[in-house]
Image: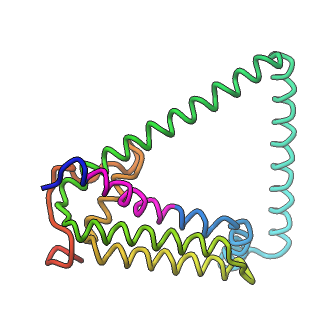
Amino acid sequence: MKGPFSRRLLMPALLGAALVPLALSAAAFSGKGGDWHEQRQEMFERAGIDEATREALAEARDEHRQALRDLREEHQARLDEILSDEQREALKTARRELRDERRTERREAMQQRLTALVDSWELSEEERTQLTEVRESLYADMQALRDREFDSREARRDAWQALREEHRAALGELLSDEQIAEMKAAMAPRGKHGHGKHPGYRHHSGKGDNRNG
């Protein structure tokens, strides 16, 4: 039903649609320092931690951070004694190359898993077109949100959360809950959450009986 040409057309759309929730999550909490401070204060309130104890905890935290900074500086000074400038540059280059190679390998492996998963879905040409349109629309909305000014971190977070929910609903119009879960599992690093159904498990998408259970 699906030839190589159709698969080449669909996979960028599927991969893009699958990556959007991750991008939304990262963008929504790009300023999470303030959010974590608020969460920590709420945690202290619930635990009944008094102000004096909070100050002592903050002081201990600052001391720990300073100790880590001092340790990093000592370690760097020791490395500078051992390595020449050329060796340091060679190590930087090797580290960058290995990181890029591993990132490429992970992306290719994820692409292969998604390809196998799509082959089991038997999507119609109309569904493929709709999936592409969903991806393009959501990326446009993401770019608009990045360029938009917000009055507070909370407003930015709420806007990203709303877009994430909109994306999930849009995917829900094309894919079943099970398919969306399978797509997330296919994107997870192997050995972490990559223990989903075998890609040979076949079911149909769309608005049929398999949707939402």
So how many labels did they put on this image? Answer: 0
Q: Quadrant of the C terminus?
A: bottom left
- Spot occupied by residue 12 in the image (x, y as percentages of width and height): 38, 55
Figure colour scheme: rainbow
- Spot occupied by residue 125 in the image (x, y as percentages of width and height): 21, 66
Q: Quadrant of the N terminus?
A: bottom left
- Spot occupied by residue 17 in the image (x, y as percentages of width and height): 41, 63
Rendering quarter of residue 149 = bottom right
Q: Look at 46% across and 73% down and name the residue there.
A: 137
Q: What stretch is highlighted in magenta?
A: 7-22
Residue 193 colored in magenta in the image = no
Q: Look at 38% across and 51% down and name the residue there.
A: 193
Rendering quarter of residue 43 = bottom right
Q: Look at 71% across and 77% down and name the residue there.
A: 153
Instruction: Examine the residues drawn in magenta and state their main secondary structure.
Output: helix
In this orientation, which residue lies closer to the viewer: 59 or 115?
A: 115
Q: Look at 54% across and 75% down and name the residue there.
A: 141
In this orientation, which residue lies closer to the viewer: 164 or 147?
A: 147
Residue 21 colored in magenta in the image = yes
**In screen coordinates, is 196 left or right of 52?**
left
**In screen coordinates, is 93 left or right of 163?**
right
- Spot occupied by residue 66 in the image (x, y as percentages of width and height): 86, 47
Asked if 80 appears above or below 130 in the picture, the reply is: above
Asked if 168 appears above or below 83 in the picture, the reply is: below
